[in-house]
Image: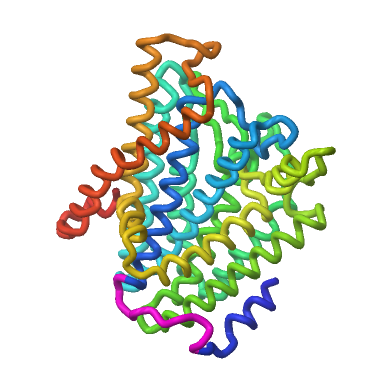
Amino acid sequence: MGAATAAALGSQTSEHVLPKAPVTVKTRLQNIDALRGFVMVLMLLDHTRETWFLQVPVTDPVDARTILPAIAFARFAVSFCAPIFVALTGLGVFLFHRTHTLQETTAYLFKRGLLLMAIEVFYLSPIYWGIAKPTLWLQVIWCIGVCMIILAGLIRLPRPVLIGLGLVIVCGHNLLDGIHLTPDNPFFIPWAELHQRDAIALPFGLVAKVSYPILAWVGVIALGYGIGPWFAPDTAPELRQRRLVILGLALLAAFVALRLNNGYGDHPWFTVEGSPLRTAISFLSLTKYPPSLDFLLLTLGVGAILLTVLERMGDAPLVRALGVFGGAPMFFYILHLTTLRLLYHTAFAIWGPNKGPLFGLDSYGWVLVWYVGLIVPFYLPTAWYSRLKKRRRDITWLRYF
Protein backbone atom coordinates (compact mmCIF):
# COMPACT_ATOMS: atom_id res chain seq x y z
CA MET A 1 0.00 0.00 0.00
CA GLY A 2 2.75 2.47 0.98
CA ALA A 3 4.86 2.03 -2.18
CA ALA A 4 1.92 2.16 -4.55
CA THR A 5 0.52 5.24 -2.88
CA ALA A 6 3.88 7.00 -2.86
CA ALA A 7 4.36 6.26 -6.56
CA ALA A 8 0.88 7.51 -7.38
CA LEU A 9 1.36 10.69 -5.41
CA GLY A 10 4.64 11.38 -7.16
CA SER A 11 3.19 11.10 -10.67
CA GLN A 12 2.50 14.08 -12.93
CA THR A 13 -0.81 15.87 -12.43
CA SER A 14 -3.15 16.53 -15.33
CA GLU A 15 -5.11 19.78 -15.16
CA HIS A 16 -8.15 17.91 -16.44
CA VAL A 17 -8.36 15.60 -13.41
CA LEU A 18 -10.08 18.13 -11.14
CA PRO A 19 -11.34 21.64 -11.79
CA LYS A 20 -9.13 24.41 -10.53
CA ALA A 21 -10.11 26.26 -7.37
CA PRO A 22 -9.10 29.83 -6.60
CA VAL A 23 -5.65 29.89 -5.01
CA THR A 24 -6.46 31.86 -1.87
CA VAL A 25 -5.65 31.33 1.77
CA LYS A 26 -9.37 31.23 2.53
CA THR A 27 -10.23 28.40 0.12
CA ARG A 28 -6.99 26.58 0.94
CA LEU A 29 -7.60 26.46 4.68
CA GLN A 30 -11.38 26.85 5.09
CA ASN A 31 -11.92 23.22 4.12
CA ILE A 32 -9.76 22.16 7.09
CA ASP A 33 -11.95 24.10 9.51
CA ALA A 34 -15.06 22.83 7.73
CA LEU A 35 -14.01 19.18 8.06
CA ARG A 36 -13.10 19.72 11.70
CA GLY A 37 -16.50 21.35 12.21
CA PHE A 38 -18.25 18.46 10.44
CA VAL A 39 -16.81 15.89 12.83
CA MET A 40 -17.58 18.13 15.82
CA VAL A 41 -21.25 18.20 14.78
CA LEU A 42 -21.18 14.41 14.43
CA MET A 43 -19.62 14.17 17.88
CA LEU A 44 -22.63 15.98 19.32
CA LEU A 45 -24.81 13.07 18.20
CA ASP A 46 -22.81 10.55 20.22
CA HIS A 47 -22.68 12.74 23.31
CA THR A 48 -26.43 13.37 23.08
CA ARG A 49 -26.95 9.60 23.03
CA GLU A 50 -24.66 9.23 26.05
CA THR A 51 -26.77 11.82 27.86
CA TRP A 52 -30.30 10.58 27.13
CA PHE A 53 -29.87 6.92 26.13
CA LEU A 54 -27.04 5.61 28.27
CA GLN A 55 -29.32 2.90 29.68
CA VAL A 56 -28.84 1.10 26.33
CA PRO A 57 -25.17 0.04 26.39
CA VAL A 58 -23.03 0.17 23.25
CA THR A 59 -20.07 -2.21 23.12
CA ASP A 60 -16.81 -1.70 21.27
CA PRO A 61 -17.05 -2.98 18.61
CA VAL A 62 -20.83 -3.08 18.52
CA ASP A 63 -22.59 -6.44 18.62
CA ALA A 64 -24.28 -6.75 15.22
CA ARG A 65 -26.63 -9.45 16.47
CA THR A 66 -28.31 -7.38 19.18
CA ILE A 67 -27.71 -3.66 18.65
CA LEU A 68 -30.49 -1.38 17.45
CA PRO A 69 -29.64 -0.73 13.78
CA ALA A 70 -30.24 3.03 14.13
CA ILE A 71 -27.67 3.18 16.93
CA ALA A 72 -25.25 0.98 14.96
CA PHE A 73 -25.23 3.31 11.94
CA ALA A 74 -25.12 6.41 14.15
CA ARG A 75 -22.14 4.89 15.95
CA PHE A 76 -20.53 4.19 12.60
CA ALA A 77 -21.05 7.83 11.56
CA VAL A 78 -19.48 9.25 14.71
CA SER A 79 -16.52 6.87 14.41
CA PHE A 80 -15.02 9.37 11.96
CA CYS A 81 -14.72 12.06 14.64
CA ALA A 82 -11.58 11.16 16.58
CA PRO A 83 -9.34 9.95 13.69
CA ILE A 84 -10.11 12.94 11.48
CA PHE A 85 -9.77 15.41 14.35
CA VAL A 86 -6.41 13.98 15.49
CA ALA A 87 -5.06 13.94 11.92
CA LEU A 88 -6.19 17.55 11.41
CA THR A 89 -4.47 18.45 14.68
CA GLY A 90 -1.19 17.20 13.21
CA LEU A 91 -1.87 19.12 10.00
CA GLY A 92 -2.65 22.25 12.00
CA VAL A 93 0.66 21.93 13.86
CA PHE A 94 2.52 21.85 10.53
CA LEU A 95 0.75 25.01 9.35
CA PHE A 96 1.54 26.68 12.69
CA HIS A 97 5.18 25.65 12.37
CA ARG A 98 5.42 27.29 8.92
CA THR A 99 5.09 30.72 10.52
CA HIS A 100 6.84 30.02 13.84
CA THR A 101 10.26 28.82 14.88
CA LEU A 102 10.89 25.30 16.12
CA GLN A 103 11.25 26.62 19.66
CA GLU A 104 7.94 28.54 19.44
CA THR A 105 6.15 25.52 18.00
CA THR A 106 7.57 23.21 20.66
CA ALA A 107 6.59 25.60 23.44
CA TYR A 108 3.07 25.92 22.03
CA LEU A 109 2.65 22.15 21.78
CA PHE A 110 3.82 21.62 25.36
CA LYS A 111 1.60 24.35 26.79
CA ARG A 112 -1.44 23.35 24.72
CA GLY A 113 -0.91 19.68 25.51
CA LEU A 114 -0.67 20.28 29.25
CA LEU A 115 -3.74 22.53 29.13
CA LEU A 116 -5.80 19.84 27.38
CA MET A 117 -4.72 17.22 29.90
CA ALA A 118 -5.65 19.55 32.77
CA ILE A 119 -9.07 20.31 31.24
CA GLU A 120 -9.80 16.58 30.95
CA VAL A 121 -8.79 15.81 34.53
CA PHE A 122 -9.95 18.86 36.47
CA TYR A 123 -13.03 19.95 34.52
CA LEU A 124 -14.45 17.34 32.16
CA SER A 125 -14.13 14.35 34.50
CA PRO A 126 -16.04 16.04 37.36
CA ILE A 127 -18.74 17.71 35.26
CA TYR A 128 -19.42 14.79 32.96
CA TRP A 129 -19.22 11.89 35.38
CA GLY A 130 -20.02 13.60 38.69
CA ILE A 131 -17.84 14.51 41.64
CA ALA A 132 -19.28 11.64 43.70
CA LYS A 133 -17.26 9.16 41.66
CA PRO A 134 -13.51 9.61 42.26
CA THR A 135 -12.70 8.72 38.65
CA LEU A 136 -10.40 10.45 36.20
CA TRP A 137 -11.56 9.65 32.67
CA LEU A 138 -8.56 9.89 30.33
CA GLN A 139 -10.51 10.35 27.12
CA VAL A 140 -9.94 12.03 23.78
CA ILE A 141 -8.90 15.45 25.12
CA TRP A 142 -6.28 13.85 27.37
CA CYS A 143 -5.12 11.72 24.43
CA ILE A 144 -4.74 14.71 22.10
CA GLY A 145 -2.85 16.61 24.79
CA VAL A 146 -0.36 13.76 25.29
CA CYS A 147 0.01 13.33 21.52
CA MET A 148 0.78 17.04 21.09
CA ILE A 149 3.55 16.82 23.68
CA ILE A 150 5.01 13.77 21.94
CA LEU A 151 4.72 15.51 18.56
CA ALA A 152 6.80 18.37 19.98
CA GLY A 153 9.71 15.93 19.97
CA LEU A 154 8.84 14.10 16.74
CA ILE A 155 8.80 17.25 14.56
CA ARG A 156 12.56 17.37 14.94
CA LEU A 157 12.80 14.22 12.83
CA PRO A 158 13.20 14.47 9.04
CA ARG A 159 9.75 14.41 7.44
CA PRO A 160 10.24 11.02 5.67
CA VAL A 161 11.31 9.47 8.98
CA LEU A 162 8.29 10.97 10.74
CA ILE A 163 5.92 9.63 8.07
CA GLY A 164 7.60 6.23 8.20
CA LEU A 165 7.25 6.11 11.97
CA GLY A 166 3.58 7.07 11.70
CA LEU A 167 2.95 4.30 9.17
CA VAL A 168 4.74 1.70 11.28
CA ILE A 169 2.65 2.62 14.32
CA VAL A 170 -0.69 2.75 12.51
CA CYS A 171 -0.12 -0.41 10.49
CA GLY A 172 1.69 -2.44 13.12
CA HIS A 173 0.17 -1.62 16.49
CA ASN A 174 -2.40 -4.44 16.23
CA LEU A 175 0.50 -6.89 16.48
CA LEU A 176 0.65 -5.85 20.14
CA ASP A 177 -2.98 -6.73 20.89
CA GLY A 178 -2.02 -10.03 22.48
CA ILE A 179 0.07 -8.33 25.18
CA HIS A 180 -2.11 -7.89 28.26
CA LEU A 181 -0.50 -6.82 31.52
CA THR A 182 -2.04 -7.06 34.97
CA PRO A 183 -1.85 -4.36 37.67
CA ASP A 184 0.90 -6.19 39.54
CA ASN A 185 3.23 -5.82 36.53
CA PRO A 186 5.66 -2.86 36.87
CA PHE A 187 4.92 -1.85 33.26
CA PHE A 188 1.13 -1.97 33.66
CA ILE A 189 0.56 1.79 33.96
CA PRO A 190 2.62 2.89 30.93
CA TRP A 191 1.22 -0.01 28.89
CA ALA A 192 -2.37 0.89 29.82
CA GLU A 193 -1.69 4.45 28.69
CA LEU A 194 -0.08 3.25 25.46
CA HIS A 195 -2.19 0.38 24.19
CA GLN A 196 -4.32 -1.40 26.81
CA ARG A 197 -7.66 0.19 27.67
CA ASP A 198 -7.84 -0.34 31.40
CA ALA A 199 -8.40 1.17 34.83
CA ILE A 200 -5.45 2.39 36.91
CA ALA A 201 -5.71 2.52 40.71
CA LEU A 202 -4.36 5.79 42.09
CA PRO A 203 -3.67 7.04 45.64
CA PHE A 204 -6.52 8.38 47.83
CA GLY A 205 -9.05 6.01 46.27
CA LEU A 206 -8.88 7.62 42.85
CA VAL A 207 -9.17 5.58 39.68
CA ALA A 208 -7.96 6.65 36.23
CA LYS A 209 -9.79 4.98 33.34
CA VAL A 210 -7.85 5.06 30.08
CA SER A 211 -10.44 5.28 27.32
CA TYR A 212 -8.04 6.37 24.58
CA PRO A 213 -4.69 4.53 24.74
CA ILE A 214 -2.35 6.85 22.87
CA LEU A 215 -0.02 4.66 20.77
CA ALA A 216 -2.09 4.47 17.58
CA TRP A 217 -3.11 8.12 17.91
CA VAL A 218 0.56 9.16 17.98
CA GLY A 219 0.86 7.55 14.55
CA VAL A 220 -2.24 9.41 13.32
CA ILE A 221 -1.07 12.84 14.50
CA ALA A 222 2.36 12.20 12.97
CA LEU A 223 0.81 11.33 9.59
CA GLY A 224 -1.40 14.41 9.77
CA TYR A 225 1.71 16.51 10.26
CA GLY A 226 3.40 14.61 7.43
CA ILE A 227 0.91 15.72 4.75
CA GLY A 228 1.31 19.36 5.79
CA PRO A 229 3.33 20.42 2.71
CA TRP A 230 0.34 19.55 0.53
CA PHE A 231 -1.35 22.61 2.05
CA ALA A 232 1.54 24.99 1.54
CA PRO A 233 0.70 28.21 -0.38
CA ASP A 234 2.89 27.17 -3.31
CA THR A 235 1.07 23.84 -3.83
CA ALA A 236 -1.46 24.02 -6.67
CA PRO A 237 -5.01 23.21 -5.53
CA GLU A 238 -5.49 20.59 -8.25
CA LEU A 239 -2.30 18.80 -7.16
CA ARG A 240 -3.34 18.83 -3.51
CA GLN A 241 -6.80 17.55 -4.37
CA ARG A 242 -5.44 14.82 -6.60
CA ARG A 243 -3.07 13.66 -3.86
CA LEU A 244 -5.86 13.60 -1.29
CA VAL A 245 -8.19 11.63 -3.57
CA ILE A 246 -5.50 9.07 -4.40
CA LEU A 247 -4.57 8.75 -0.73
CA GLY A 248 -8.21 8.37 0.30
CA LEU A 249 -8.97 5.75 -2.34
CA ALA A 250 -5.80 3.82 -1.47
CA LEU A 251 -6.74 3.74 2.21
CA LEU A 252 -10.29 2.63 1.43
CA ALA A 253 -9.04 -0.08 -0.94
CA ALA A 254 -6.68 -1.34 1.76
CA PHE A 255 -9.57 -1.36 4.25
CA VAL A 256 -11.80 -3.42 1.95
CA ALA A 257 -9.00 -5.87 1.17
CA LEU A 258 -8.11 -6.41 4.83
CA ARG A 259 -11.72 -6.59 5.97
CA LEU A 260 -12.68 -9.13 3.29
CA ASN A 261 -9.65 -11.20 4.25
CA ASN A 262 -11.03 -11.16 7.81
CA GLY A 263 -7.62 -11.58 9.36
CA TYR A 264 -5.22 -8.94 10.60
CA GLY A 265 -6.53 -5.45 11.31
CA ASP A 266 -9.53 -5.96 13.60
CA HIS A 267 -11.88 -8.49 15.16
CA PRO A 268 -13.41 -10.82 12.54
CA TRP A 269 -16.79 -9.93 11.11
CA PHE A 270 -19.45 -12.56 10.52
CA THR A 271 -22.59 -13.33 8.55
CA VAL A 272 -25.86 -12.99 10.47
CA GLU A 273 -28.15 -15.68 9.13
CA GLY A 274 -31.18 -14.22 7.36
CA SER A 275 -30.20 -10.58 7.96
CA PRO A 276 -28.12 -8.78 5.30
CA LEU A 277 -28.56 -5.60 7.34
CA ARG A 278 -26.95 -7.07 10.45
CA THR A 279 -24.26 -8.68 8.32
CA ALA A 280 -23.43 -5.21 6.97
CA ILE A 281 -23.37 -3.90 10.54
CA SER A 282 -20.92 -6.67 11.46
CA PHE A 283 -18.67 -5.75 8.52
CA LEU A 284 -18.61 -2.11 9.63
CA SER A 285 -18.28 -2.84 13.35
CA LEU A 286 -14.71 -1.76 14.00
CA THR A 287 -12.69 -1.36 17.18
CA LYS A 288 -12.13 2.21 18.38
CA TYR A 289 -10.51 1.68 21.81
CA PRO A 290 -7.69 1.54 20.80
CA PRO A 291 -8.36 2.21 17.11
CA SER A 292 -7.68 -0.79 14.91
CA LEU A 293 -5.86 -0.59 11.59
CA ASP A 294 -9.14 -1.24 9.74
CA PHE A 295 -10.83 1.52 11.74
CA LEU A 296 -8.12 4.03 10.81
CA LEU A 297 -7.95 3.01 7.14
CA LEU A 298 -11.67 3.56 6.70
CA THR A 299 -12.04 6.77 8.68
CA LEU A 300 -8.88 8.49 7.44
CA GLY A 301 -9.59 7.42 3.87
CA VAL A 302 -13.01 9.06 3.97
CA GLY A 303 -11.48 12.07 5.71
CA ALA A 304 -8.95 12.63 2.90
CA ILE A 305 -11.71 12.55 0.28
CA LEU A 306 -13.92 14.88 2.33
CA LEU A 307 -11.09 17.43 2.45
CA THR A 308 -11.12 17.51 -1.33
CA VAL A 309 -14.91 17.71 -1.56
CA LEU A 310 -15.05 20.62 0.88
CA GLU A 311 -12.26 22.48 -0.91
CA ARG A 312 -14.02 22.09 -4.24
CA MET A 313 -17.19 23.48 -2.68
CA GLY A 314 -15.30 26.73 -2.17
CA ASP A 315 -17.07 29.36 -0.09
CA ALA A 316 -20.45 27.60 -0.04
CA PRO A 317 -22.77 28.42 2.89
CA LEU A 318 -22.46 24.89 4.28
CA VAL A 319 -18.66 25.12 4.28
CA ARG A 320 -18.80 28.47 6.06
CA ALA A 321 -21.25 27.14 8.66
CA LEU A 322 -19.16 24.04 9.37
CA GLY A 323 -16.08 26.23 9.51
CA VAL A 324 -17.61 28.10 12.45
CA PHE A 325 -17.65 24.92 14.54
CA GLY A 326 -14.19 23.97 13.30
CA GLY A 327 -12.78 27.42 14.05
CA ALA A 328 -13.49 27.11 17.78
CA PRO A 329 -13.50 23.36 18.48
CA MET A 330 -12.41 23.47 22.12
CA PHE A 331 -14.99 26.14 22.95
CA PHE A 332 -17.72 24.05 21.30
CA TYR A 333 -16.50 20.87 23.00
CA ILE A 334 -16.62 22.34 26.50
CA LEU A 335 -19.85 24.22 25.79
CA HIS A 336 -21.84 21.25 24.55
CA LEU A 337 -20.62 18.79 27.19
CA THR A 338 -21.33 21.25 29.98
CA THR A 339 -24.78 22.06 28.61
CA LEU A 340 -25.71 18.40 28.14
CA ARG A 341 -24.73 17.60 31.73
CA LEU A 342 -26.72 20.55 33.07
CA LEU A 343 -29.74 19.43 31.05
CA TYR A 344 -29.37 15.86 32.29
CA HIS A 345 -29.03 16.82 35.96
CA THR A 346 -31.99 19.20 35.64
CA ALA A 347 -34.15 16.42 34.19
CA PHE A 348 -32.91 14.00 36.85
CA ALA A 349 -33.76 16.47 39.62
CA ILE A 350 -37.26 17.04 38.24
CA TRP A 351 -38.32 13.53 37.24
CA GLY A 352 -35.82 11.30 39.02
CA PRO A 353 -34.42 8.01 37.71
CA ASN A 354 -36.67 6.16 35.28
CA LYS A 355 -34.18 3.73 33.67
CA GLY A 356 -32.71 1.93 36.63
CA PRO A 357 -30.41 4.41 38.39
CA LEU A 358 -30.44 6.70 35.32
CA PHE A 359 -32.80 9.13 33.68
CA GLY A 360 -33.28 8.37 30.00
CA LEU A 361 -35.57 8.74 27.03
CA ASP A 362 -37.82 5.88 25.94
CA SER A 363 -36.89 6.04 22.25
CA TYR A 364 -33.71 6.67 20.29
CA GLY A 365 -35.85 8.76 17.97
CA TRP A 366 -36.13 11.37 20.74
CA VAL A 367 -32.33 11.39 20.99
CA LEU A 368 -32.22 12.38 17.31
CA VAL A 369 -34.81 15.09 17.96
CA TRP A 370 -32.68 16.50 20.78
CA TYR A 371 -29.58 16.32 18.57
CA VAL A 372 -31.12 18.27 15.69
CA GLY A 373 -32.69 20.76 18.07
CA LEU A 374 -29.36 21.55 19.77
CA ILE A 375 -27.28 22.30 16.67
CA VAL A 376 -28.47 25.89 16.15
CA PRO A 377 -28.39 26.84 19.87
CA PHE A 378 -24.78 25.63 20.00
CA TYR A 379 -23.93 27.30 16.68
CA LEU A 380 -24.76 30.82 17.85
CA PRO A 381 -22.32 31.11 20.80
CA THR A 382 -19.67 29.18 18.87
CA ALA A 383 -19.99 31.66 15.99
CA TRP A 384 -19.56 34.52 18.45
CA TYR A 385 -16.42 32.99 19.92
CA SER A 386 -15.02 32.10 16.50
CA ARG A 387 -15.40 35.74 15.40
CA LEU A 388 -13.78 36.88 18.65
CA LYS A 389 -10.73 34.69 17.99
CA LYS A 390 -10.30 36.15 14.51
CA ARG A 391 -10.90 39.73 15.65
CA ARG A 392 -8.65 39.62 18.71
CA ARG A 393 -5.54 37.87 17.50
CA ASP A 394 -3.63 40.07 19.93
CA ILE A 395 -5.05 38.04 22.85
CA THR A 396 -2.59 35.16 23.01
CA TRP A 397 -4.57 32.84 25.29
CA LEU A 398 -7.48 32.68 22.83
CA ARG A 399 -5.43 30.46 20.53
CA TYR A 400 -5.38 27.77 23.22
CA PHE A 401 -9.18 27.49 23.16
Q: Quarter of the image holding residue 337?
A: top left
Up-down: is 8 above or below 222? below
Tell me the residue at 82%/38% (across/down).
274
Q: Does the magenta run of residues contain 22?
A: yes
Tell me the residue at 70%/32% (across/down).
182
Q: Quarter of the image holding residue 97?
A: bottom left
Pick the residue in front: 340 or 171. Answer: 340
Tell me the residue at 47%/69% (across/down).
308
Q: Is residue 266 left or right of residue 189?
A: right
The type of colouring in the image is rainbow
Q: Is residue 320 left or right of residue 274?
A: left
Q: Position of residue 209 (x, y in %)?
A: 54, 31
Quadrant where the N terminus lies?
bottom right
Count of picture labels:
0
Tell me the residue at 81%/52% (across/down).
262
Q: Is residue 309 left or right of residue 391?
A: right
Pick the residue in front: 12 or 161. Answer: 12
Up-down: is 229 above or below 290? below
Residue 115 in sight from this viewpoint:
yes
- Point out the stretch of residues depicted in magenta: 15-26
Pick the residue in front: 23 or 372. Answer: 372
Residue 102 in sight from this viewpoint:
no
Furthest-right residue in this view: 273
Q: Quarter of the image holding residue 59?
A: top right
Q: Position of residue 129 (x, y in %)?
A: 44, 24
Q: Position of residue 329 (x, y in %)?
A: 35, 49
Q: Main secondary structure of the magenta part?
A: loop
Q: Does the magenta run of residues contain 307?
A: no
Up-down: is 102 above or below 86? below
Q: Position of residue 42 (x, y in %)?
A: 46, 45
